[in-house]
Image: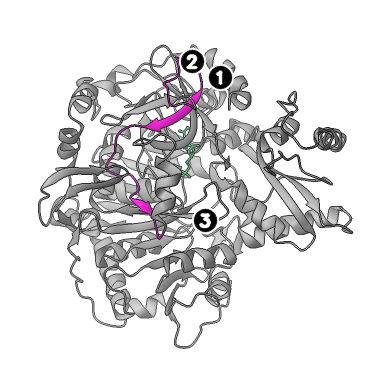
Amino acid sequence: MADATAGTIEALLQEQRRYPPPPEFAANANANDPSIYRRAEEDPEAFWAEQAKNLDWFKPYDRVLEWNPPWAKWFVGGELNACYNCVDRHIKGVRKNKAAIIWEGEPGEERVLTYRDLYREVNRAAAALQRLGVKKGDRVAIYMGMVPELPIAMLACARLGAPHSVVFGGFSPAALRDRINDCEAKVVITCDGGYRRGGIVPLKDNVDTAVAECPSVEKVLVVQRVGPTAKQVTMHEGRDIWWHDALHAEPWREVPCERVDSEHPLYILYTSGTTGKPKGVLHTTAGYLVGTSATHRLIFDLKEDDVYFCTADIGWVTGHSYILYGPLTNGATSLMYEGAPDYPDKDRMWAIVEKYGVTIYYTAPTAIRAHMRWGDEYTRHHDLSSLRLLGTVGEPINPEAWIWYHTNIGKGRCPIVDTWWQTETGMILITPLPGLVTLKPGSATFPFPGVSAAILDEAGNPVPNNTGGNLVITRPWPAMMRTIYGDPERYVQQYWSKYPGMYLTGDGARRDDDGYYWLLGRVDDVVNVAGHRIGTMEVESALVSHPSVAEAAVIGISDELKGQALAAFVTPRSGVKPSDSLIQELRAQVTKEIGPIARPDKIFFTAELPKTRSAKIMRRLLRDVAEGRVLGDTTTLTDPTVLADIKRQYEETET
Ligand code: WTA
């Protein structure tokens, strides 16, 4: 790792700028007493018990935590319902007519759902799912665009105690099929199509292709979003039902919230790991809601009249935790935008901020770098004075992008919370508390109160300050994943075996002399392309499934805009001639197997790949080649000339 990150550490060590909380912000902040850190550290369980008071429980829990590493149970013996906490309880009081979801469609429609509206719709959807046979414990797959029916569907599942598995709408039919089959979903919820940059994503057609190979699926519920003029879909008799028909098939009734145990599964979300097969990260109910709501309230400093806008897609964990569950548990107004940030023009996000008076804006560094590149004029024409707090997530933010965001969007007034976390962690773990922490651009600052982290060397010893190492979390936290669905051994092996009793994040980090954490990117075979998490092994499997490919190695290379991009080194089968058209075919193959987000930016053909004597591909050396570094140690290679050849070819193609 030292090789890959030495340059980054060097650059970050130069970062001297400091941004203390603006005094007025600090005075009114939800977290404004620095003793929160000490108190949580002295008694983490008491801290989390305090946070758990923000939920409504059907039955109080007996114990905060039962920890048999690596198996955790939080709020043991409690009973509750996530949908009740996100919806029902808010209509009993002053939030009844408050906007829960403000939605803007890409073509420009607007919809506002108050908490009462949401309650009405979620009950209709829950009744419809019940009629389709969905019961507590059944899995429901959801493959939709960013329309209000997506959170409605998720909440309806939660109401019935049926774990949902949302699959990002940019995944291919093959990827969708594998996810549905892994969790054996009984019902799939989709849309006829989704708008994206003026075009239409054929969601229902993709579902048709996927479900043809999914024996568990009994029914497909279809939201009409774009049709029938923009897109005709085929409805399969006996299997497919229109959402609007299903939701209005009987008079409105309240569907009682299922009382579920604290540890009842809330959802499964697939994410990329270091093997070819995506992992079904399982989150449960009570701990997840406590963790996401507490972090949302304290990190985003949520106030009753805030208009909160997270630009993620609900298909990723950021959308689950910080568009839906955290904000709605807190009774917030959460804004959802359906489409692309540059459609119809590059000022779309700022037009939305102005139009709805957004106060809190949460996005990814890649998006900020894109706005930087597009230029300031797109921000200048809009009144951004409603904003009071900014956030970032998904990848390390370079100080230049941080400063641009602070200056051009925050106008120097708004603190920025750089939040580090993962699908597996469920909630933000390393972050500033904006009223308490002096910011350093590029640093996610400190672990959240009650969270304990360390940076270790390969032998498990803490590294000295300003030295990179493996980031681990040394104590359980409420929203942590509970297992990998259907594969508990992989959960143990992947996350808890390298340093027993500690959670291995897969990220590198360093701590400076002031104790600030600086995230250095993944140290395993996972790549963050534009904030999207992609496993290099998945892309390799997709490439070798093409008949012309004998072998492939995929690596992440640094990319100015996307943070990282993918480069593939491909060995064709004998007799196959490398060509531009083969490159196109291979890119299409990856799109087919995974989706366009996983398409390699660069594909190089090579007669052989550099391997150790034990036949391991040396990806580290390929990274050296691709990033133009001096080659690292090549003595373990079977044939060092292979690498020299690749380097020569690579340099020739690059120039
Ligand atoms: C990266 C997204 C640096 C990290 C919530 C992690 C970050 C992976 C940050 C998880 C950040 C996320 N600074 N890196 N603030 N936030 N990451 O599962 O490499 O899609 O392991 O969850 O994103 O990606 P995932």
Residues at marks 2 and 3, CA–CA distance in whole angstroms? 45 Å
Dot 1 alpha-carbon crowd within 10 angstroms: few under 14, some 14 to 19, many 20 or more: some
User: Which mark sits nearer the N-terminus, 1 or 3?
Assistant: 1
Q: Residue furthest bottom?
A: 237
Nearest the camera: 459 or 299? 459
| Residue receiving disc 1 | 9
Q: Residue 568 location in percent, x, y?
A: 72, 45
| Residue receiving disc 2 | 466
Answer whether residue 463 is magenta in the image: yes
Q: Which quarter of the figure is the C terminus placed in? A: top right
Mark 1: which amino acid?
Answer: Ile
| Residue receiving disc 3 | 106
Q: Residue 404 location in percent, x, y?
A: 53, 25
Establish whether ligand 1 lies closer than 8 Å to the Cβ of label 3.
Answer: no
Q: Residue 604 location in percent, x, y?
A: 79, 45
1 and 3 marks in contact (CB < 8 Å): no
- Camera-nearest label, 1 or 3: 1
